[in-house]
Amino acid sequence: MSFSMPIAMSSLAVQRSVTNKLFGLQRWQPVRFRSNALVTLDTDDDVARFSLKDPSAKSQAQTKGMKMPKRQKMSRKAKLNELKWYRLKAKKKLKSPNPEVRIRYKLEKAKRKEEWLIEKLRKYEIPKAPGPEHDPEILTEEERFYLKRTGEKKKNYVPVGRRGVFGGVVLNMHLHWKKHETVKVVCKPCRPGQVHEYAEELARLSKGAVIDIKPNNIIIFYRGKNYVQPEVMSPPDTLSKQKALEKYRFEQSLEHTSQYIEKLEEELEEYQKHVALYKKHEQTTTANSMNSN
């Protein structure tokens, strides 16, 4: 009798330790609520082995192979209703009696448009093609003066309009250089300082030399002493005529949008200052009335 109690107690302790190891149980947790794992007995090679299997793992493995159902497409009516809801929301903000709400709505809309335009303009950025560096010819003062006078007298010219510098401009320059040493590039319309940017870009693309830049936005180019007409007269790292026009339109829109954003920000600042002054005036009036009473 004295030996049976310790043996029974030890067997219970072993049973508890086994269940704790198998199921990760605590003392305060009942066994039936603690895990949904299955205990299996494997008797391979005349050796008994207990193993735990999670039934949820099987279901997860099955779901991995299965394709998830596609999201249902919205009907045309649902899309129209959603658009109507957004338009109504925007209309409420535009017709809000609070000026700050109206200004903030316009400002957010303009900033979204600005981000969209910047993303659009990134598509028109063409990396410069690696090639031999252009070494401009060194001309004496007499040669430069002679070429300047001849360039002014001759009537051949290449226009650079709103599209800016693109492949067609360089092509026309090479076509003029077939018969003439110099060519005039007329930049209209042209912002202040932009003519110098055009001169650098055209000198890089055409491998010509800039002789003079006139105040009326006219650049005189010289083809060079050892000029050889290239096989591809329109450089590959330039935009086409259509894309250059699209880029110009996006640039114009971006410029106007940025100006509009600045204007709205100024209006918002003025309104906030006005509100602050009004509140300050109200506080002073209430304080004076309290003092008088």
Image: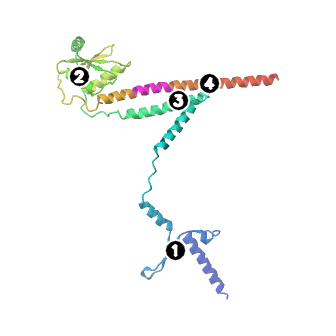
Do the numbered discs 4 and 3 sit on residues whose CB atoms are within 8 Å?
A: no
Quick one: which residue is furthest to the bottom in this view? 1
Residue at numbered disc 1: 39
Amino acid type, residue under disc 1 in the picture: Val
Q: CA distance from mark 4 to mark 3?
A: 19 Å
Residue 207 shows in the view: no
Residue at numbered disc 2: 173
Q: CA distance from mark 1 to mark 4?
A: 74 Å
Q: CA distance from mark 1 to mark 2?
A: 86 Å
SS state under label 3: helix
Tell me which secondary structure the magenta stretch mostly adopts.
helix
Amino acid type, residue under disc 3 in the picture: Lys
Do the numbered discs 1 and 2 sit on residues whose CB atoms are within 8 Å?
A: no
Estimate the x, y position of residue 85 in percent, counting from the top left: 53, 38
> For the residue carrying disc 3, how many other residues have a C-alpha within 10 Å: few (<14), some (14-19), or many (20+)?
some
SS state under label 1: strand
Estimate the x, y position of residue 249 in percent, counting from the top left: 38, 27
Of labels 1 and 3, earlier in sequence is 1
> For the residue carrying disc 1, how many other residues have a C-alpha within 10 Å: few (<14), some (14-19), or many (20+)?
few
**Which span of residues is magenta-colored?**
251-261
**Position of residue 194 in the picture relative to residue 225 (left or right):** right
SS state under label 4: helix
> For the residue carrying disc 2, how many other residues have a C-alpha within 10 Å: few (<14), some (14-19), or many (20+)?
many
Q: Which is nearer the eye, 110 or 68?
A: 68
Do the numbered discs 1 and 4 sit on residues whose CB atoms are within 8 Å?
A: no
Of labels 1 and 2, earlier in sequence is 1
Of labels 4 and 2, earlier in sequence is 2
Residue at numbered disc 3: 106
Which mark is in front, 1 or 3? 3
Which quadrant of the figure has residue 20? bottom right
